């Protein structure tokens, strides 16, 4: 797959913008990066993009948002990629490889452990549908 350097820099800028808007709305935002003469990406921008790791893929947007909310409840920042494309036309999910849930590389192990945890036994003691006396 061919990745254009200007598109990659713009993608990194969008990720930073999203992070700035969700974490600290008072922080000043940088302008989008300018294309360089040699057409090569800056090393720090490539390193920032490589900090995110895909830990799960989904076919449905609702499932992806539920899992992202679960990680947010545990304090892990997660991003969804290609969710708008799949919402626009669900057949794109096959071509794009699904909706990708990505987390920072440092949070990968903890996020995978959270997603692997089974909470179904906690629901055994819940009184659902029983009339109160």
Image (tube, grey):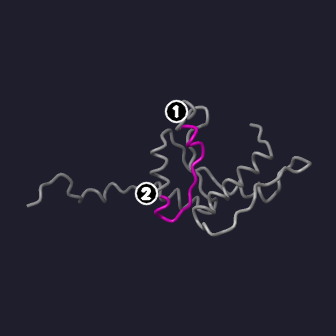
At horizontal 64% and vertical 59% (from top left) the residue drawn is 105
Q: 60 above or below 34?
A: above
In-front residue for pair 127/66:
66
Per the image, is 83 magenta? yes
Answer left or right for 52 relative to 65. Answer: right
Residue with the most extreme right position: 37
Q: What residue range appears in magenta? A: 71-86
Q: Residues within 10 Å of mark 1 (few under 14, many from 20)?
A: some
Q: Residue 43 placed where, x, y %?
A: 82, 57
Residue 126 in which image quadrant: bottom left
Q: Residue furthest top?
A: 91
Q: Nearer the viewer, residue 86 or 33?
A: 33
Where does residue 54 sit, x and y in percent of width and height?
A: 60, 50
Residue at image point 88% right, 51% down: 36
In the image, taking residue 3 as reference, residue 124 lies left or right, namely: left
Percent coordinates x, y for residue 22 in the rendering: 57, 62
Could you say which disc has been placed on residue 90 in the image? Answer: 1
Please check the rendered image and state whether residue 103 is part of the magenta-colored stretch, yes or no.
no
Residue that carries the numbered disc 2 in the rendered image = 117
Residue at (63, 53) in percent of width and height: 53
């Amino acid at each position: 797959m061919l990745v254009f350097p200007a598109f990659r820099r713009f993608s990194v800028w969008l990720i930073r913008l999203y992070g700035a808007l969700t974490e600290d709305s008072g922080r000043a935002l940088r302008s989008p990066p300018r294309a360089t003469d040699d057409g090569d990406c800056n090393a720090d921008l490539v390193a920032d993009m490589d900090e995110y790791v895909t830990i799960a893929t989904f076919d449905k947007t609702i499932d992806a948002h539920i899992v992202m909310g679960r990680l947010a409840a545990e304090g892990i920042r997660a991003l969804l990629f290609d969710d708008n494309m799949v919402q626009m036309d669900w057949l794109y999910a096959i071509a794009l490889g699904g909706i990708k849930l990505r987390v920072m590389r440092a949070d990968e192990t903890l996020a995978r452990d959270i997603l692997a945890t089974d909470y179904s036994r906690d629901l055994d003691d819940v009184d659902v549908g029983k009339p109160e006396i």
